[in-house]
Image: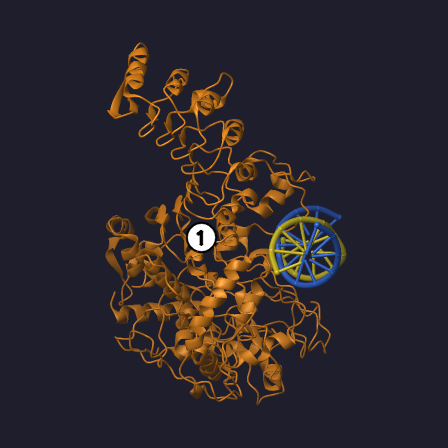
Chain colours: A orange, B blue, C yellow
Amino acid sequence: MDVLTKFLLFFSLQQREANRPKPKMGTSAAVKLPSNRSASGARRRRTRCRKCEACLRTECGECHFCKDMKKFGGPGRMKQSCIMRQCIAPVLPHTAVCVVCGEAGKEDTLEEEDKFNVMLMECSICNEIVHPNCLKVKDASGVVNDELPNCWECPKCNYAGKTGKQKRGPGFKYASNLPGSLLKEQKAVKEEGEATSTSTAKRKPEGDDISRHRPEEREPLHRHPPVLTPSTLPRPRPEDKLRKKRKLFDDDEEEDFSVRKKGKADEPLPPLKTPVLDSDQSHCSSPQAGPSSEGGSEPQEKGPRPKARRKRRLPNKELSKALNQEIQKTEDCLANENRQPLKVEPESENEEPKRGFRIGSDLGGERPHLRTKEMNGTPWELRHFYPSQITPLGFNRSSPGTRPLPPRSPPKCVQMERHVIRPPPISPPPDRLPLVDGKTHAVQREVWMKLFGHFTHKELCVCMRVCKTWNRWCCDKRLWTNIDLNRCKSITPLMLSGIIRRQPLSLDLSWTNISKKQLSWLINRLPGLRVLLLSGCSWVAVSALCTSSCPLLRTLDVQWVEGLKDAQMRDLLSPPTDNRPGQLDNRCKLRNILDLRLAGLDITDASLRLIIRHMPLLSRLDLSYCNHINDHSVNLLTAAGTTTRDSLTEINLSVCNRVTDHSLTFFKRCGSICHIDLRYCKQVTKMACEQFIAEMSVSVQFGLKEDKLLQKLS
DNA sequence: GTCAACGTCTCG
DNA sequence: CGAGACGTTGAC
């Protein structure tokens, strides 16, 4: 598609957004909040949008929360939504009404441009829900938070200079579930990015603000419509995301165009502006407010929000790098994005002058999902705090805060850490590529898919930046069944998010520095994972498997894991010790393992006994370079009554110097053995191997593929 | 009234 | 600080 086409697409998306159905508002009967709940007023609980991909999914039945549900045999105590169904854009309840006029939102009755003033907006700081039109304070401007539908920082709070944190009432949840490490990392990442983005972030808001603010009061002037220039095209940048508005309700999954802000120097491409901006306002429909910036933690910081751009350190590998980039960009776009400021805040000067941020924001609106919630329902904060940053794939994006802060100090934002998890898209991707003229490209998706199937992951990441449709297509699980991050030094939150989005069947994290929390977080969100390669990782990280569930895991590679010995194997293989009601599953979490790779570990027969006991389906076992493995170990594995005796088809004992010829006699008992690797076993002789072949020939024909490498012939 | 699950509290 | 528990809200 050419740029123009993309833009057109963008516009159409915006329009859609504008037209998207709004939640019905309840009647005035709805609960009313205390009129003065200003700062601490109780917040209305939000409810599912019922339209996002997450809401449309069925429960996975495998996540932690599903397992707690009575319907899945759990105790039902946790009362939490399935992880995969956590709403991306929770809406105000139907019963919500304006604290001023007592009426529900009326956005359905107006055109896009006017909707904003008549829709209910919840202040993320004081929690007040009002129609912007009902506010008396006209001078001040509110800052819309795109991350969450109908959310903003109301003019009063803005004017007061409150920061989200300060103001934030008790209602804002934090993503307490997220792995701290992830968060931290993200944070770090963000900060890096933010440093650069600080100004931007704020700006955005500003720009946005301007545009968004009540039309009447303020002129749309502020907003500068982004100029589209061919060059500007769509690469989604982080910031863009920020800016984008999210379409809250849209079903589209990924959107992708991102517009660039004009002024970013960073951008590779010249900044674009979208002409459409104005229309963006319409986006407001789901304005979100969030204390944007506030990362919550420090009020001050808000000001200088980091720019959206993230500069994260990229992993060494190209793929990881590409993945990261792709994630960032794409997701930005996708993600819903950014908050849009309604008006310009009184802000600080530091910030950049309002630029036409909005541009980006508009675009951004496309994806609702982005706003996914966090686990346990803490998504809000994320959104509020980092509206822009939150993206499905990448948690962190540094997004600018809504409000500009004075100091540029790097934001610490504690809250920034929170991150939103966006479930993989559930809606079917478009079958054809939309063209500028409204028609579609003749070549169907499946044909493109065949083409994409020949690309490397790195190339796919590049393709994902081309346009929204390609983004969607290139994210197809079929193209990412195996994600290889082997030896990628830095596993970033964005990468983790990207992995979740792609739901690979096989994941190679070998020789990475992944942390326990990251791995735990990841595993819990990859219920369909079949192959997990963790060789060379630390035991601390691998220990995440002790508490995480990966029911379909078939292949586990923990070779050369530092610190993994018998005691650790026990922790890994032992069933959960929690016998409280509801914790019914006391079977080994790795009971379905078929292929276990333990090369280079200091394990003894104690571990083998556990393996025999807990892995009844074990077919392939790699014990190479295990110095404690000896003939007795082989005897155990092949003893009468053990499941491994019949299930083992391949065993690797190469470089096990304590194994002798005697082990070969034990293997004769194995009914299914097809491959025995005894290479470099000093105490195994070629003669013994030949004798084994001769004796087995009665029933099974073996051959020596290499010296001391026995393989069944056939 | 029932069911789902949000958001906060509590405990380890 | 994170995970779990649970009161309560919101939808139907």
Q: Is residue A375 left or right of residue A488?
A: right
Residue B10 in the image: x percent, y percent? 75, 56
Q: Give the quarter of the image for residue A297.
A: bottom right
Quarter of the picture holding the N terminus of chain A: bottom left
**Observer able to see residue A19:** no
Q: Is residue A556 left or right of residue A549?
A: left
Q: Is residue A548 left or right of residue A258?
A: right
Q: Amino acid at mark 1?
A: Ile
Mark 1 surroundings: few (<14), some (14-19) or many (≥20) residues within 10 A? many
Of residue A192 and residue A553, the one placed in the foreground of this image is A192
* SS assignment at label 1: helix
Which residue was labeled with disc 1? Answer: A500
Residue A347 in the image: x percent, y percent? 52, 87
Q: Residue at x 39, y 52 (%)?
A: A428
Of residue A437 and residue A408, the one placed in the foreground of this image is A408
Residue A649 in the image: x percent, y percent? 38, 25
Q: Where A670 falls versus A570 (above or below)?
A: above
